[in-house]
Image (cartoon, coloured by chain):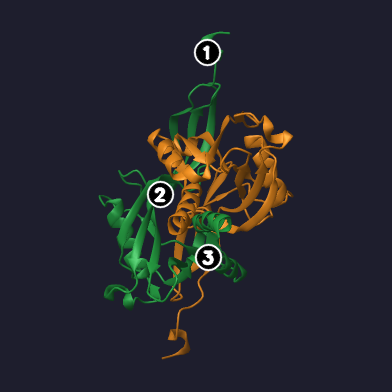
Chain colours: A orange, B green
């Protein structure tokens, strides 16, 4: 056996060939070599707006604590033209050029929900749809003191630049039931909210 | 105030205008009306392979129980040309035409990891990147008996049709530490794995 046959090779992209450029999205062919060294092509979508930062966008796991209430997750309801549907998502948005992840997370949380909070964790650079898209995000966790004056009277409807965003507080201890009700109402849940709820429920079942 | 000004209108997509069609992906303009009734345009990517079923793909939260080991989540490492990187993801794949979600979930789990299991839950139709794409998935939870003869000697490297997939068992009680190590090694974590781990950790912190 020669050395070239002795094991899997490192896969890599060797060339990007742009096929079409829209205003916000582009399609490319990524020419890559697989684990056998064979050259292959993969069709890829990306955002034209991606700046020098590593990730396109930020999403926020915001947990609100209020005296007399169970801890709740801040979710938003909005219309999403790509899905032709209203969705339930974490607050999220594109990272502006030159903006830090921390600033983007707290800005999007404030713009989309009215809430102010403090960051308790910054996640890794993660993929949104790795079989199709180069888009990545970071998930930032934020603790919101719901009893704080600045958060006492936040509006149920928020948004900037023509956005119409409804803010929904979902008690963590009934998150699965709430997601079931949203789906029954025809809303599409975001996969990250669903996965968060699955992880949460798994521990609860084991421990409680 | 006339009735047309009395509150937000129902948003809806009124026309899809295809801009480009590749082999696997297409770009469209979705013409839609916002909550004020104003017509707007949103650039959207979709899969040309989408069949009559509601969702493009399925992902599997597979938990392996083995005597003498802590429960572990089955994750896979593979090269993803769109991200020009190796990724850590849940087993996942496209749903074939005419295939049920249950069949697709167990087939993908078997093809990509070698494991056989039984379904314990089927999630909702969820979005992958709702600001950009029409793609949706269902997340299916599967219980794997690692002591079962059929699962005793599964390979660490799996895949069909040129796939080269490495199977990784991550103990649930150290999932955050494992994800940190993967990221330090330059791997991109999928956002659903990250969100699952966040939900899992949140309960653990509260209760333990």
- Precedes in sequence: disc 1 or disc 2: 1
Residue lying at the far bottom of the rendered structure:
A1
Residue A174 in the image, given as x and y percentages of width and height:
47, 43
Q: Which residue is drawn at 47% across and 58% down?
A: A207
Q: In the rendered image, which residue does mark 3 sit on?
A: B175
Q: Do labels 3 and 1 share a chain?
A: yes
For the N terminus of chain B, which image quadrant? top right
Q: Comparing marks 3 and 1, which lies closer to the viewer?
A: 3
3D distance between C-alphas at marks 1 and 2: 37 Å
Q: In the rendered image, which residue does mark 2 sit on?
A: B137
> Would you identify the image quadrant in which residue A1 lies?
bottom left
Residue B124 in the image, given as x and y percentages of width and height:
39, 45
Host chain of mark 1: B
Mark 2 closeness class: few <14, some 14–19, many ≥20 residues within 10 Å: many
Q: What element carries label 1?
A: helix
Host chain of mark 2: B
């Amino acid at each position: 056996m020669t050395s070239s046959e002795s094991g899997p090779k490192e896969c890599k992209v060797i060339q990007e060939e742009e096929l079409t450029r829209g205003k916000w999205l582009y399609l490319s062919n990524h020419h890559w070599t697989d684990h056998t060294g064979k050259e292959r092509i993969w069709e890829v979508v990306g955002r034209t707006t991606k700046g020098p930062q590593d990730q396109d966008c930020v999403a926020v796991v915001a947990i609100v604590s209020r005296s007399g209430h169970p801890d709740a997750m801040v979710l938003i309801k909005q219309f999403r033209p790509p899905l032709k549907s209203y969705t339930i998502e974490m607050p999220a948005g594109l990272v502006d050029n030159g903006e830090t992840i921390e600033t983007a997370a707290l800005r999007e949380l404030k713009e989309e929900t009215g809430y102010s909070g403090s960051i308790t964790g910054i996640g890794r650079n993660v993929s949104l749809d790795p079989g199709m898209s180069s888009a990545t995000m970071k998930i930032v966790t934020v603790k919101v003191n719901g009893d704080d004056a600045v958060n006492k009277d936040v509006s149920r409807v928020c948004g900037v630049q023509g956005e119409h965003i409804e803010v929904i507080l979902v008690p963590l201890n009934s998150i699965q039931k709430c997601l079931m009700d949203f789906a029954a109402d025809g809303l599409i849940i975001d996969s990250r909210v669903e996965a968060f709820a699955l992880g949460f429920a798994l521990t609860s079942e084991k421990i409680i």
